[in-house]
Amino acid sequence: MLDAPPHVITVGAGLLDEALRAQAVRTTPVDWRPPLPGTAEALATVLADPRRQAANERAVGRLLSARPHLTGVRRASEVLPAGTFLHAGPPITWERASGPMRGALVGAMLLEGLAGDEHEAADRLAAGAVELRPCHEHAAVGPMAGVVSPSMWLFEVDDAEHGGTAYCSLNEGLGRVLRYGAYGPQVLERLRWMDEVLGPALAGALRRTGPIDLRALMAQALQMGDELHNRNRAATSLLLRVLAPALVETAAEHAAAVLRFIDGNDHFFLNAGMAAAKVSADAARDEPGSSLVVAMARNGTDFGVQVSGLGGRWFTGPAGVPDGLYLGSYGPGDANPDIGDSTITETAGLGGFAMAAAPAIVRFVGGEVADAVRATRSMYEITLAEHPAYQIPALGFRGTPVGIDVTLVARTGLLPVVNTGIAGRVAGTGQVGAGLVEPPVEAFTSVLLTLAESVSDQF
């Protein structure tokens, strides 16, 4: 050993590697991280499950082969149980609801004429006047607060491969909007216009166009600089090109106003994309033994995870406050903890997992272009596949990382990358910024422990 210069292998010790290199010592760094604390025994049990590999292959195969098509726009009253409001994230009660969630629920009460003012609305919600249910439990997703009430209109997306259906509300735009917890007169006026004009106009246009292939549209948008969570400029433009002639033909009286509204809202496509991601992820559900994540969602208080092999059970931890860029004079003290179902995009291999395709996203969520590329590359370590349709030009048209595996999260200690809007913590504030947020470790640890229990019970 002393006859030649030393050559040191450093394992998971970045500082040591840097110190040795500074002294001109040859090193071979090995990127290693310890597993999540307290998961070693459960991880070994789950990895030994003879069903796991085949179950994951079947589940992720269905996710990848899903073919979401936008088929219509429908009133929520057609698909909602009577007396029910939907909301984002895992189940939540009025008592535990955050400021923006309460604000959105109050606004929905006012919109539906179920209360005369915000105080009566809050009192009636506290008394259980309407049932609060997660969007995910009704084949739906909702951005931010995600509140859906009967008079709202929903995108309807069907999976042409596996036959599923998913729904998402129509996007109001940015700033002071219901999904960020605002409920003032302008918010309600816009929602009423969406009810009376936008929804019917879009429904008529889609009857004329027929189903729109969202998978193909989203694949094209990725190659035009979107990541399809916080950047949807290309996707919105592509959708507008398809809808515009049909809108003019079927809703001439309102076509200009509808087109102007969509043109002024770069995030209009987000909600259709969320429904596409939802129907794709739902195709992978209910595969016994699978450790594939099929939903991540936040209600402003809790961050919840669901996995294919454990049905509709939620595993939760406290939602974190995003780290990012703030609007105007707002700062971290004004931010509510993470909220919304839009993490379904990351679940399906988009959003934070596809940031390398959208270098301009860093101007919205913070960081540098290299950070966006690094974030995407890191997600290949915790996913089971690369999407055959959703490809990233900057990575040589490599497919986006898709199919989060709880065992890989536990083994690497890496958590999913999520980019998100930031809602003001006080009801009625609206959006205060955008950034990145880490899911809570507790949610993934709980999933793994429960998977291990299910393996022990099975065998």
Image (spheres, rainbow, N blue to C red):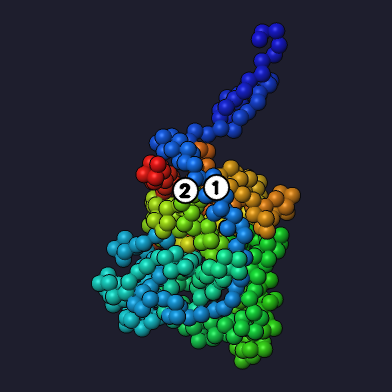
Q: Image check: 351 left or right of 138?
A: right
Is there a contact, CB below 8 Å, between mark 2 and mark 1? Answer: yes
The front one of 59 and 277 is 59
- Pick out the residue farthest to the bottom: 253
Q: Which residue is drawn at 65% across and 70% down?
A: 213
The numbered mark at residue 289 is 2
- Pick out the residue farthest to the front: 459
Query: Is disc 2 placed on a helix, strand or loop?
Result: loop
What residue does disc 1 label?
Answer: 54
Q: Which residue is drawn at 56% across and 30% down?
A: 12
Across and down, in percent, residue 226 comes to 65, 61
Q: How crowded is mark 1: few (under 14 residues within 10 Å), some or many (20 or more)?
A: few
Across and down, in percent, residue 144 comes to 47, 64
Classify 313 as above or below 124.
Answer: above
Across and down, in percent, residue 150 comes to 42, 79
- Pick out the residue farthest to the left: 127
The front one of 189 and 316 is 316
User: In what quadrant of the picture does the N terminus appear?
Assistant: top right
Q: Which residue is drawn at 30% across and 72% down?
A: 125
